[in-house]
Image (spheres, rainbow, N blue to C red):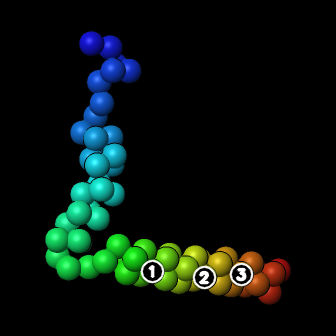
Amino acid sequence: MTDQQAETAAAVITKTAPPVSVSLATVAGFQVSELVLWATLVYTVIMIGHKVYQIYKEVSQTLDK
């Protein structure tokens, strides 16, 4: 068996995580559409926070000069 054929445990877990998560959430009573909605909301808030932090850093560097 070559290194290219062998998959690490992390690769296998990464590949199986999304379908397993959706299956478990469905069994727990959550709809997939709700999960997508909340994941999108969290992602958007994180991206806005990251952008605001970048702008703050640029402005503070400009003011320090």
Residue under the image location 65 percent in, 84 percent down: 52
Crowding around mark 2 (Cα neighbors within 10 Å: few <14, some 14 to 19, many 20+) is few
Say which label, 3 or 2, has the lower sequence index. Answer: 2
Give how far across and how far down residue 5 sits, in percent: 33, 21
Does residue 20 sit above or below 55 in this rendering?
A: above
Residue under the image location 29 percent in, 65 percent down: 22
* 20 or 48: nearer the viewer: 20
Does residue 1 sit above or below 38 in this rendering?
A: above
Does residue 52 sit above or below 7 in this rendering?
A: below
Q: Is residue 34 visible?
A: yes
Q: Quarter of the image holding residue 21?
A: bottom left
Q: What amino acid is at disc 1?
A: Leu
Q: Secondary structure at mark 3?
A: helix
Give how far across and how far down residue 15 sits, in percent: 34, 46
Left of 48 or right of it: where is 31? left
Crowding around mark 3 (Cα neighbors within 10 Å: few <14, some 14 to 19, many 20+) is few
**Separation of disc 1 and disc 3 at Cα?**
27 Å
Say which label, 1 or 3, has the lower sequence index. Answer: 1
Q: Secondary structure at mark 1?
A: helix
Please give the residue where the numbered disc 1 appears in the rendered image. 37
Please give the residue where the numbered disc 3 appears in the rendered image. 55
Residue at the outermost top position: 1
Q: Quarter of the image holding residue 28?
A: bottom left
Q: Nearer the viewer, mark 1 or mark 2?
A: 1
Please give the residue where the numbered disc 2 appears in the rendered image. 48
Position of the C terminus by quadrant: bottom right
